[in-house]
Amino acid sequence: MGYIAKISGEQVPVSVTGEDEYHRIKVGDKEFVVDAFWTQNDLISLIIDGRSFQVDIHSANDNYGVMIEGEHFEFELYDERKALLKSSAGLGTEGAQEITTSMPGKIVKVLVSEGDEVSEGDGLIIVEAMKMENEMKSPKTGVVKKIGVGEGDAVEAGSLLVIVE
Amino acid sequence: MGYIAKISGEQVPVSVTGEDEYHRIKVGDKEFVVDAFWTQNDLISLIIDGRSFQVDIHSANDNYGVMIEGEHFEFELYDERKALLKSSAGLGTEGAQEITTSMPGKIVKVLVSEGDEVSEGDGLIIVEAMKMENEMKSPKTGVVKKIGVGEGDAVEAGSLLVIVE
Amino acid sequence: MFKKVLIANRGEIAVRLIRACRELEIPTVAIYSEADRNSLHVRCADEAYCVGPPPSAQSYLVIDKILEVAEKTGTDAIHPGYGFLAENPEFAKLCKDHNITFVGPSAEAIEMMGHKTVARKTMQNVGVPVVPGTETVDDDDVLASRAKEMSFPVMIKAVAGGGGKGMRIVREEKEIKEAIRAARSEAKSSFGDDTVYVEKYLEEPRHIEFQILADRHGNVIHLLERECSIQRRHQKVIEEAPSMALDDDLREKMGKAAVDAAKAARYWSAGTVEFLVDREKNYYFLEMNTRLQVEHPVTEMITGIDIAKEMFKIAAGEKLSISQEDVKMNGWAMECRIYAEDPFNNFLPSPGKILTLREPSGPGVRDDSGVFAGYEVPLHYDPMISKLCTWGGTRTESIQRMKRALGEYVIKGIKTTIPFHQRVMNNEKFLAGNIHTGFIEDECIMETSDDSEDLMNVALVAAALHLQRKSREGVGTAGPEKTGTDAWKMMGRRSRWVT
Amino acid sequence: MFKKVLIANRGEIAVRLIRACRELEIPTVAIYSEADRNSLHVRCADEAYCVGPPPSAQSYLVIDKILEVAEKTGTDAIHPGYGFLAENPEFAKLCKDHNITFVGPSAEAIEMMGHKTVARKTMQNVGVPVVPGTETVDDDDVLASRAKEMSFPVMIKAVAGGGGKGMRIVREEKEIKEAIRAARSEAKSSFGDDTVYVEKYLEEPRHIEFQILADRHGNVIHLLERECSIQRRHQKVIEEAPSMALDDDLREKMGKAAVDAAKAARYWSAGTVEFLVDREKNYYFLEMNTRLQVEHPVTEMITGIDIAKEMFKIAAGEKLSISQEDVKMNGWAMECRIYAEDPFNNFLPSPGKILTLREPSGPGVRDDSGVFAGYEVPLHYDPMISKLCTWGGTRTESIQRMKRALGEYVIKGIKTTIPFHQRVMNNEKFLAGNIHTGFIEDECIMETSDDSEDLMNVALVAAALHLQRKSREGVGTAGPEKTGTDAWKMMGRRSRWVT
């Protein structure tokens, strides 16, 4: 099977051949011969060229979180068919950036207005969650295109706060 | 729902009424009001009259193994319909007792012959498993009705070794 | 000893105290909010009662309800843990009025030490040096101008503060107003009291504290020091005992000051006297915490004394069974607080369900955890989920063990601060012991990254196998694409090839 | 220090050694049999290589294959753990021939001490008392008559024995032939050598052993004693350090005898000198184990010395960094060996898949485990799955902690000896320290039962809820009744209302 991994905006082709416990896997132009043992769906023991790895996997849609030896890695991974769909639909993330909150909370302060120019790292909005105030910063230099909330609003996980373009 | 628990040959009726987190459960003639929280299918937190219990359950067919506060309990539990079936099929265990092995091993020695009279606790057969020799003892006083294996045999888990009646 | 003890707390400290009671063979009563029905402390206790809805102001802080449970269950002692009601003198007093022993100091001692400015005065009276600072001031403008007079940097502090909350450091005049507002707001929501004052902020100080044990018969000893200089947002995140900054001479002097401080407050129970130590090894009284502290395990590990159990014995009126001479320093202990926070995303809280949990163990490792696999970290409370401690014969060994243990620790489903601790444990300055309370900010810990491209490849290999298996089983990949945000959404930071 | 270490073992001890190497920052190579692909030691090591089919004679005992892996991977040291090749002098010699450091004593020392009757003679020569006994005898009848001359009870012992295997106690003449046969057969399959001899069996002796550390420069110290009197089938199941039977005087005398024994064998590395101590506090040399022992953690806990790491340092040629005076006894430690055995069914091995695993933690608890949730305990090897240790300031505290920890330990899917340990920890004689090697048999531990009818009711409540939920989901109850045996089959014992 052919897959595309997307890491920091870069696309890396990954392909899997071989069956059962021995697999040949190409990442970019490197090939690995892999002995894989599944303990549970999300816990795998890999032995690659004698090197042993215990790997914990967490996946949600195309997003993968992988833990190995205490290190965490995150990337997107999908098959080639979907990669084609994605590129034709223009689902790149270079343009507008949505700032969302990953947990319920309260909007303490909105620091910018729509139309403001902001630099990467500028504070946009202060959210209180789990008793702490957290300042959401701009992921890029650009213009505040939309503000989705007002001061004092209670927000749910996943709420759109700001769009910077 | 009405159930029958079978413990040490004794039958205890158990019934469950009530929904969601609060249940009324009768065991014999005692009634319990139970607040149950399921973490996984086999891990439950129970609060009964303020008393808190963390319960781990292992079930295989009608056989239940339950761990609470480091104590282990074992019994059979089935619904009333099946209890009826069981009693009409005469599946009591008072009569013949089958001695089986729960793991693969090798028969080192057979200490009795068919027709021998044995007392509870008498050695019947020696099985080697996991590098240890284990003497299987008679669960009751009676007569050796059948010997299912011979010395030197390799046996699988669940093999019938001896029947004592 | 007590017939039954109620633990007026939740999370890891409730579990810690239930363990102590179990070892002392005292039955325990847990209380829980509606958000905590599925908590570990509820499962571990002998009895458990719900005391209200999720917000702590409606549950863990409601004194009447807690005393009602205590009376209903025949409880004769209440341990408050830390936070919540631990330093509430009114609660200590009400326990006494109900003939229930409060496992902690007297209401008077809590009151005296809880009010930071009163505490400072008490210490000055017995000759313990304190950091220069103001009285409390209600008017923001007056407070701001007092701060200006002291010259920046200064620290805004809540008089009722603790655990890093209600504190703000101010380096420039233009920041002062917003800092006072934020400190007051945090103090109000955390302690119900928005009174603040201003202290001179020492540059690159070490935070060093002495653990005190005192009985109700006037015997006071200290169990050596802890160094808690590794802080983030003024909250301790890594602690160790002993401290590299002290030699035997300074240890004795500060230990004596700590004992004097406890005596001045007519203190009994376990308590902690906190000091700041500057580069010239001058020490200043900071505050006294009149409770069991989060970081007590490191002291237990180097002294062999179970502080939680000692608190119960002292509360029951027993005399201390150990004298100062019996306290021997044995090896080195390190603690990393594991939070449900995303260290790669500005330490934003990361509540959610723990899908997998594998705790480290083996030689020299202790994990005081409040969670289990299947547990949902609620968003209503402090996001600390466990305290990982290691012991070694030397500081180096304790750090090597910590690295090993952090590598073994697997928590899946939520983000945790484990990667943060791994970076600290590999930081040159930390290894050399060159630390101060601004260490985390100065070192930009999360911007360092190991060059582990190999491991990234392994991660891709594993994910590809996972995806292949998933598509064969025909689950999850064919459905419609979810839009919007999700658990792995990255925000305000560059993506990582490697971490 | 070494560039890379191969661990020629499996299970918990392989994990223990990998942890030691990780703390020393030495990369590790694991070996595994086909039955162990899914083992914890394979996952923990940096590298892992399969060395053959499940039977250890075709994998873990195949010296050539192991040396081949060592050479291929650039390994410069091999640690054998315990069991398997740990006390095989040929292996030690071959390692040397391949320029690989054997992390253990010299082949000569292993050979001398491994041969029990040679060891006995060596000890007699340096004035250490030994238990009366015979030479080795090949002919069963001659051996039987020699045994008769000594007067019963006697003990048949394999010269190559260890870990309780190849031993049989004989109390009556009529049992002697079968006992010799069984001892020889077990010795043959465990050690490949069926030579046995006979020793006088002391009545109600204590088993007390001294941990030795010796470097390659002639320095020998002991790390105090362990008491290992709680045995089943001559195999230690509970160990503690120190021993209640010794006072400082006897401790010093026996410690000196142990050091003398090690010196007589020109010993280096970690080792253990075992003694029997009778009711009159006479002590007799039993044997010397020339390896790291299962129960080493209790010594580590009371001395703070990491014995596994010391072995690597000694093997690398370092001098001992500690002298006898530096060895301080600190508190009390207890170890319970957790086996995959059914204590309610004559301790029959209980292999199978571990469905749930929750390990105890918190103050004073250490678990050295070789398993994880999802792991299938294979039936080819020793059924020990973990060693649970607790430390306390006193023996009482270490026992209280052990009770607490055993209560927290959940292993589901297989039977374990946890209920057995709980009974011992509540036994009056054990609590009083009145123990000897026949304690388990004398006390009929598994026949005691707590009167916990209440808990039985709770178990029924939980099971009823479980069954109701299951039938609603429509799984599992409608199918045909399985016939024959199953995992919960009870055999040879009465069923239990309560356990």
Image (cartoon, coloured by chain):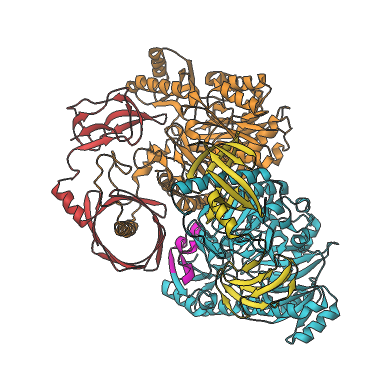
Chain colours: A red, B yellow, C orange, D cyan
Q: Count of labels shown?
A: 0
Magenta residues, as a range? D22-48
Residue in view at x 47 percent, y 50 percent: C409
Which image quadrant for residue D13? bottom right
Q: Is residue B34 above or below residue B138?
A: above
- Horizontally, residue D167 falls left or right of residue C407, namely right
- Where, by quadrant of the figure, is residue A17 drawn? bottom left
Given residues D402 and C466, the one toward you in this image is C466
Of D480 and C317, the residue lying toward us = D480
Residue D83: x and y in percent read 60, 71
Asked whether, in this view, residue C305 is left or right of residue C411, the answer is right
**Residue C245 or C422: which is nearer the viewer?**
C422
| x then y, percent, for residue A98 | 23, 36
For the point 42% across and 38% down, the residue is C439
Residue A153 drawn at (x, y percent): 31, 24
Expressed as whole percent of the image width and height from the top left, the position of residue D169 reads 76, 72
Question: Residue lying farthest left?
Answer: A88
**Quarter occupied by residue C75:** top right
Q: Which quadrant: the N terminus of chain C?
A: top right
Work out whether residue D100 or residue C133 is closer to the camera in this orientation and state it.
Answer: D100
